[in-house]
Image (cartoon, grey):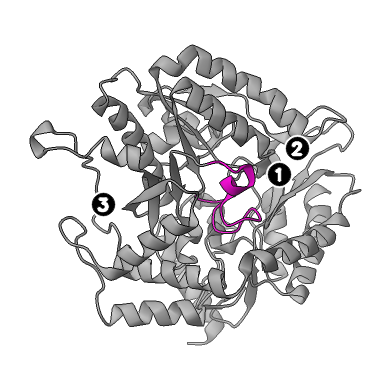
Amino acid sequence: MQDRSRNQDIARRDLGVVWHPCTQMKDHESLPLVPIERGEGAWLYDFDGRRYLDAISSWWVNLFGHANPRINAAVRAQLEKLEHVILAGFTHEPVLRLSERLTGLLPAGLTRCFYADSGSAAVEVAVKMSFHYWLNQGKPGKKHFITLANSYHGETLGALAVGDVELYKSLYRPLLMEVTTVASPDCYLREPGETWEEHSRRMFAHMERALAEHAHETAAVIVEPLVQCAGGMRMYHPVYLQMLREACDRHGVHLIADEIAVGFGRTGTLFACEQANIRPDMICLSKGLTGGYLPLSVVVTTEDMYAAFYDDYTKLTAFLHSHSYTGNPLACAAALATLDIFESDRVIETNRRLAARMAAAAGKLADHPNVAEIRQTGMILAIELVRDRQSRTPFDWRERRGLRLYEYALSRGVLLRPLGHVVYWMPPYVLEDEQLELLADVTAQGIDIACA
């Protein structure tokens, strides 16, 4: 069987048995699936040898390229020793070493690691842990959560409840707990002449009012620090996080930082919270934690949180959340190799130079009649497409302009997956100059085609 027919055969068989995520499967009557045989660096290769530049890090997870030799070697070595063991009553060296490394890298005071297997699961852990903390403290009425408009924290029911992207949430609303949603500090919505900092400070008034009204019944505020990724890569100033930390302390409410998408160098620092010089009560990490290799997530929290659950068994205060693959040794080995690369290769410093080159490459689109804004935080760059630049009139979502760009980019060997009418770059950190040139060229031509 020739390679090209192998591509077609795999796609045909797949559509007979696989239900793909975030997909209207009927689209594949006209939109071919892309079978991938292997990856190398920033490239993905199909069975015909055609390659695609992975400009979105395979859903924001891949940091150091596909089939990275150093991470491969770490996982391979671990596989020869221990693939998995129950983490209740047992432990193993990779989970211990990873926990020591993470608590050494995160803001001081985050000292306890609770593992899960996905970003959504980490948010579920944090939400349950916050409520349960207050219950153990004799405050069962603190069971409410405050979240930001346009936020996204995952698609399991608890995580979905504390998010606010209507596309994901509206259908399942009857199944979800009620939360208080306050206006986002999203700086795309700032007034003419207003700086990011001024806008973010002004928008904090909404959060202050919500805390003043609901603190007595609120367990936690949950936010995505600096970038609301699934909500269209909307961004805000670190001062909002500073004000939020102070207000949560003043009102006696936990602060949960969802750094699932923005952690591990994506925003220009290892963790986004560093830019505000704050320490959340809980930080949720996943995606880049293993360099894009294996499912793993963790909630890192404080000694105070840990102590609230520490008591005699008969008091029934223990936190009983669990996952079968909690702290999987293979995933921990990949995470440790990922942290080794950060340490040895001066990744954050290199990323800042790459981010500057990304800004220059995208800057050529600044005057495009259908580009309302180009915004960037570290290694996340977003281009907001509109019908009319002056009025910022958006395209009708039913026109699916982003899908047109996606199809064009694939035809040029680039994987872009716009969020509605927002085109974004979130590439692996190994992106080379000629690859960036290709990405910029395809994006520019794709915008022309999509907006025609």
Label 3, secondary structure: give it: loop
Depth check, mark 1 against mark 3: the one in front is 3
Q: Residue 234, position in %: x, y?
A: 67, 40
Report if residue 192 lies within the magenta region.
no
Residue located beneath label 2 in the image? 395
Q: Quadrant of residue 90?
A: bottom left
Cα separation, mark 1 vs mark 3, equals: 37 Å
Asked whether the viewer can see residue 428, the reply is no
Comparing 406 with 182, the one in front is 182
**Segment colored magenta:** 260-278
Q: Residue 10, position in %: x, y?
A: 46, 72
Cα separation, mark 2 vs mark 1, equals: 7 Å
Which residue sits furthest top? 213
Query: Are dots 2 and 1 in contact, CB under 8 Å?
Result: yes
Query: Are dots 1 and 3 in contact, CB under 8 Å?
Result: no
Residue located beneath label 1 in the image? 421
Give me the residue at 77% from left, 51% from top.
450
Give me the residue at 46% from left, 15% from top.
214
Amino acid at the residue labelled 1? His
Q: Residue 418, position in %: x, y?
A: 66, 51
